[in-house]
Image: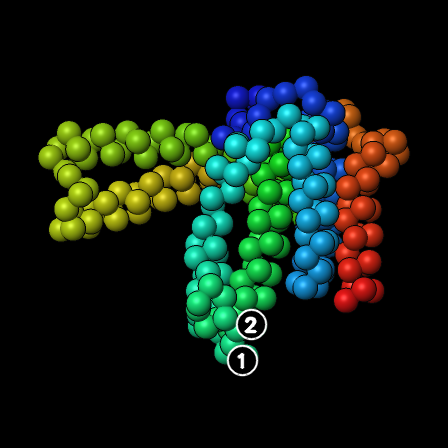
Amino acid sequence: MGAGHGHVLYRESDSPVHRLPPEVKIVAMVVFTIAVVATPRTAFWAFGAYAVLVAAVAALARVGPRWLLSRALIELPFVLFAVALPFLGSGERVDVWGLRLSEDGLHGAWNILAKGTLGVLASLLLAATTSTRDLIVGLDRLHCPQVLTQIATFMLRYLDVLVGEARRMRVARISRGDDPRFLWQLRGFAAGIGALFLRAFERGERVYLAMVSRGYTGRMPAVWQGDGAASVGQWLVAATVPVLAASIAATALVLT
């Protein structure tokens, strides 16, 4: 679990958001997302306010809008589904630019686009300001079930090993005349995947037995978590965004 095990979304920086302990950022992101989801879809002003909060955090974290928007393309399948809703929805129809569209479909499309985009952007900001190791440490400090955090820890530790092994197996297949572009060679590809799974399973058994022989009891030692647990002041600072988001959601529910 050294510093070399990062992820492609993490952006190294010394911003105030980066310096916050991971557990407070995880809680802030979850509460913000819940507030966005709880907001009525017709409260258009509320989603604008959420966008301002996201932009403010991004600026504070020194994460550029181009980086955020390019990574947010991961939600493209949901965008395509949302675009189809006004045409496929039922109920009362309205004229929009010469097209007869479903009013419920339009509201549903807006609901998916607004809430989905804000949720993706919030998740990207968390990933951009928190390394993978710190994310697991934060989940552990929040008393996430140990089974989940241990699985994530080992997956992170050995993911590079498995990727390297899969790459070597692919080179070996190609050097023997295999070309995965042809359909009739999918059988060999599937056999390679099965072999990789068996190797990963056997490696996991060996690693687990080696750790048990060295005193492993199902929980990483406290030294692995390191210092830097969140103080009261850091919790209060991180609570600014979720408290504002919750206030916006409550106001929208009252006014709608």
Q: Nearer the viewer, residue 97 or 72?
A: 97
The residue lying furthest to the left in this view is 177
Distance from disc 2 to disc 1, alpha carbons, whole Å, reads 7 Å
- Marks 2 and 1 in Cβ contact (< 8 Å): yes
Residue 222, image x and y in percent?
73, 30
Could you tell me which residue is drawn at 42 percent across and 43 percent down?
A: 201
Specify whether residue 214 is in view: no
Which residue position is annotated with label 2? 103
Image height of 112 relative to 234, above or below? below
Q: Amino acid at mark 1?
A: Gly
Q: Position of residue 192 (x, y in %)?
A: 26, 43
Q: Position of residue 28 (x, y in %)?
A: 74, 43
- Packing grade of label 2 (10 A; few <14, some 14-19, many >=20) is some
As drawn, which residue projects farthest toward the front? 98
For residue 91, the mark is 1
Residue 178 visible here: yes
Q: Quadrant of residue 164?
A: top left
Q: Across the whole image, how many numbered discs are drawn on residues? A: 2
At label 2, the amino acid type is Glu
Does residue 119 sit above or below 108 in this rendering? above
SS for dot 1: loop
Please tell me which residue is depicted at 47% across the width and 63% down the height of the picture. 97
**Of marks 2 and 1, which one's residue comes earlier in the chain?**
1
Q: Quadrant of the image for the C terminus?
A: bottom right
Q: Residue at x 54, y 80 (%)?
A: 91
- The image quadrant of residue 57 is top right
Neighbour class for label 1 at 10 Å: few (<14), some, many (≥20)?
Answer: few
